[in-house]
Amino acid sequence: MKVVIDTDTANEVDDQYAIALALLSPERIEVRGLVAAHYGDRGGSEGIERSYEEIHRVLEHAGRAAGPGGGGSVPVLRGSHPLRYGGESSPSEGVDFIIEEARHATPEDPLWVIGLGPATGIASAFLADPSIADRVVALYHGRTRWPEKCWNFNVHNDVRAARTLFHSRLPFVLFDTGTYLRQSMAEAEARVAPHGPLGRFLTQIRRREPRWIAPEKGLFDLGDIALLVEPELCEWEEVPVPTVGWDLAYDHTHTHGRMVRVYHVDRKGTFDLLELKLTEHARSG
């Protein structure tokens, strides 16, 4: 699967785990590029740059050089600031990259755009070039209050973009679960840290803030990539795409085609998969 990951990497620690799993799963995922996303007021105007720098740190510890410019194997692009007006794209090099990659895809072999942060990037790409709709699949991390509200940190950081995505013609997978993908520090020290520089990095970043070492801290975005690597870890349903109001309420009477809504991901299987990939990577390195 050709994949572009649009990620607010500096916001927390789960994006780093998700990127790592994608990079370590080349038999399933070809990471075409990584787009550094904003993360709303929490990151402010510097959020994109912070995500950009954090992506480079993940690549470094994974033994993967970043490009373009450095001659590396994985392009890293800066994404867009939130949409200012409905129907108007927010331009960036990341959006240009998504569009260019989509134009090289086909309906039979589409580009998957994985939105682990706000929907700004994929919404902007669609608004700038709606013709990509038949060559792209959007996988968006929601964890919403289904079926009542499209309520999530990612949505709040760009409501216009989220509404654009739901109301677009893009083939759409809503990853609407993963709250319970929690791993204590004791488990991380036993199952993640021993496996090379990348395992140590993924464990150490959780010590940056006290709340990230709490037992209830979730590694939510890891589930989106687990879905792509081992689909049998997840359960899903095909449902009509509801309208999302400005109050984020779902309106199921006015719909926009159909989407796949992922409503369960196996916790044990997901962390088993991560440990297996880290172990194989450490041995090969």
Image (cartoon, rainbow, N blue to C red):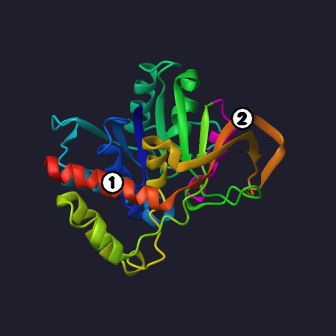
Q: Position of residue 249 (x, y in %)?
A: 77, 56
Residue 177, image quadrant: bottom right
Q: Position of residue 93 (x, y in %)?
A: 37, 36
Mark 1: few/some/many CA within 10 Å (<14, 14-19, 20+)? some
- Image height check: is 47 above or below 105? below
Q: Which mark is residue 265?
A: none
- Asked if residue 162 lies left or right of residue 62, the reply is right
- Image height check: is 9 above or below 113? below
Q: Main secondary structure of the magenta part?
A: helix
Q: Which residue is mark 2?
A: 258
Residue at x 61% of width, y 53% of height: 176
Q: Position of residue 138 (x, y in %)?
A: 54, 37
Q: Amino acid at mark 2?
A: Arg
Residue 38, image quadrant: bottom left
- Asked if residue 241 lies left or right of residue 37, the reply is right
Front-most of 54 and 274? Answer: 274
41 is within the stretch colored magenta: no
Q: Which residue is mark 1?
A: 49
Residue at x 64% of width, y 45% of height: 236
Q: Amino acid at mark 1?
A: Glu
- Asked if residue 20 lies left or right of residue 157, the reply is left
Look at the numbered disc 2 and give the secondary structure of its residue.
Answer: strand
Point out the stretch of residues depicted in magenta.
155-169
Q: Earlier in the sequence, mark 1 or mark 2?
A: 1
**Outermost left residue:** 285
